[in-house]
Amino acid sequence: MMYHHNLMFADASHPYDDANFVIMGVGFDRTSTYRTGQRFGPNAVREATWNFETWLFEHLVDMKDIKIHDLGNLDEAGKVEDMLAHVAEVSKKVLDDGKFLITLGGEHSISPGIVRHFGKPDKLSAAARKHLFGKEKLASSDGIGVLVVDAHLDGKEEHLGDKWSHACASRRMADAVGADHLVVIGVRSIARYEFDEAKKSGLRFISSFDVKRDGIEASVKRALEMIGRERIYLSIDIDGVDPAFAPGVATPEPFGLTPDDLKKLVNAVGDRLIGADIMELTPYLDPSAITAGLVARIAREIIAVKWKTGRGK
């Protein structure tokens, strides 16, 4: 089901059974339509994590005190539908074991494979429900919201005949949790017909231009109000960050978010997070590895912020 490398996420030295946080790599890029290479993203992030101190002084958190396990990378399963089924199987196992999963991509098409479980949380184990909601018995109103960071809406019903394309990632995640419980932030690229489709499907977004006008704190607050759910899954396409700061992406778009915006966003939603992914790193496009470093640092930020809330323990 998986294979392991000598290279692992820094400080992820705990056995799976003891871990509170689990790192999973999914190196898949078969639906990419511009530039490929996202399959090499997970290991590039792992290498970058070794650059950082274990002590995150602004959080008063030492990564060595947190129980983290690195699963390695999932084997590639062929067609995107097969890969999504594989991702869904493994992510459900991690959720059912009551652990916080951070997935490193790989292209954004794989995120719906994780999110599909959140549409029916009552089908998960008691340990998963306790991890997600802090209780085993759920009320009819309990549910998961999804906050997506992306330069693109990814709201197409299908792209080049494929409804599981990376260009349809937000639409497929919205299918799982409901369009009224998902918001994409940082958007600055939408096809005309996609814009019209979003009006019909109810898919909503906050553009990067809105963020620049209103500020990231106000924009995140607005997004959470729109989502209307207490528990949040965070799906980050790293091209949501401006290519001046994150050039190692397959489909760069100018006028994006800053790394500081992304850090503030993570801190704003940290106590509500129940899982996260960071996708679309394309290492060969950034020989300086600053994009890999940003992804690695944001992954550690997610762990530290979640750990501080006490819900990651």
Image: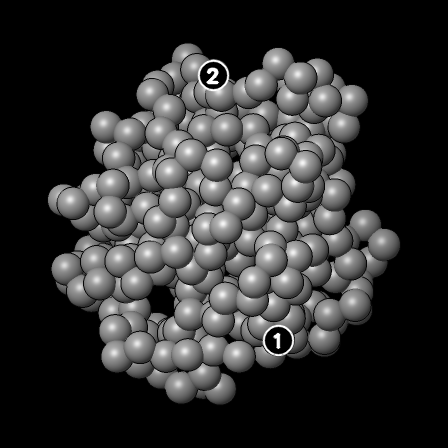
**Percent coordinates x, y for residue 121 in the rendering:** 74, 61
Q: Residue at x 46, y 51 (%)?
A: 29
- What colour scheme was applied to this rendering of the protein? one colour
**What residue appears at the point 75 percent right and 53 percent down from the top-left corner?**
119
The residue drawn where x is 50% and y is 28% is 152
- As drawn, the label of residue 93 is 1
73 vs 148, nearest the viewer: 73
Kindly report which numbered mark, 1 or 2, lies closer to the viewer in this rendering: 1
Query: Between marks 1 and 2, how big is the CA–CA gap?
Result: 38 Å
Q: Which residue is mark 2?
A: 210
SS for callout 2: helix
Q: Is residue 135 left or right of residue 20?
A: right
Q: Residue at x 26, y 79 (%)?
A: 6
Q: Quadrant of residue 146?
A: top right
Q: Quadrant of residue 46?
A: bottom left
- Count of picture labels: 2
Residue neighbourhood size for the residue with mark 1, other residues' Cα within 10 Å, grouped as few (<14), some (14–19), many (≥20) = some
Can residue 152 be seen from the camera position used here?
Answer: yes
Contact flag, marks 1 and 2 (Cβ < 8 Å): no
Q: Quadrant of residue 13?
A: bottom left
Identified by mark 1, the residue type is Lys
Q: Amino acid at mark 2?
A: Asp
- Say whether disc 1 or disc 2 marks the residue closer to the N-terminus: 1
Q: Is residue 205 above or below residue 25?
A: above
Specify whether residue 234 is in view: no
